[in-house]
Amino acid sequence: MKKGLLVLALCGFAFVGVQAQTTTPPTEPQTEINQDRVKIAPDDLPQAVRNSISEKDDVRDLRITEAYQVTNMEGELHYEVHFDKAGEAVTKKYDAQGNEVRED
């Protein structure tokens, strides 16, 4: 009788142990960014954006390394431009009218 209870108790512990191993820890919340990001040639930037770049002292003489056309979830379009500043990467964002978009 004692052996039967002992076997039953061990089976119960084994079942609980298996259940404890199959649970997964909660994952960290992830921020999902839904936007279309298309790489474009720097020459394909809108004229207003190119004018804005040529008028700003801080980026006028910098080489454009990459340019992207980005559409966010709300359908708003902006342009992300990457510059090379003596080996340091500088990124600026502009709306279609050439206004610099600042993130808060």
Image (cartoon, rainbow, N blue to C red):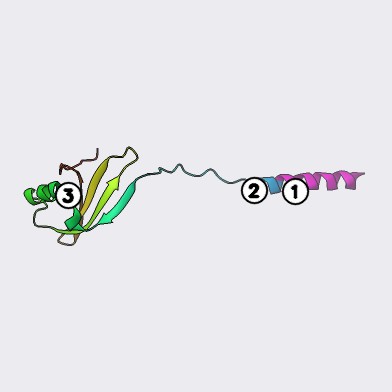
How many neighbours does mark 2 have within 10 angstroms: few (below 14), some (14-19), or many (20 or more)? Answer: few
Please tell me which residue lies in front, 78 or 27: 78
Q: Quadrant of residue 98?
A: top left
Percent position of residue 29, x then y = 45, 41
* Relative vertical location of residue 87 with respect to residue 33 in this rendering, above or below: below
The circle on residue 14 is: 1
Q: CA distance from mark 1 to mark 2?
A: 13 Å
Name the residue: 30% across, 44% down.
71
Secondary structure of the residue carrying tag 2 is: helix
Q: Nearer the viewer, mark 1 or mark 3?
A: 3
How many neighbours does mark 1 have within 10 angstroms: few (below 14), some (14-19), or many (20 or more)? Answer: few
Q: Amino acid at mark 1?
A: Ala
* Relative vertical location of residue 52 with respect to residue 41 in this rendering, above or below: above
Name the residue: 66% across, 45% down.
20
Task: Name the residue tied to disc 2.
Answer: 22
Q: CA distance from mark 1 to mark 3?
A: 67 Å
Q: Quadrant of the N terminus?
A: top right
Name the residue: 16% across, 42% down.
97
Task: Name the residue tied to disc 3.
Answer: 46
Bounds of the magenta segment = 1-16
Please tell me which residue lies in front, 44 or 58: 44
Q: Amino acid at mark 2?
A: Thr
Specify whether 72 is left or right of 63: right
Secondary structure of the residue carrying tag 1 is: helix
How many neighbours does mark 3 have within 10 angstroms: few (below 14), some (14-19), or many (20 or more)? Answer: some
Q: Quadrant of residue 62?
A: bottom left
Which of the two labelled residues, at mark 1 and mark 3, occupies the earlier sequence position? 1
Res 83 visible: no
Percent position of residue 53, x then y = 12, 50
Marks counted in the figure total 3
Which of the two labelled residues, at mark 2 and mark 3, occupies the earlier sequence position? 2
Q: Quadrant of the C terminus?
A: top left
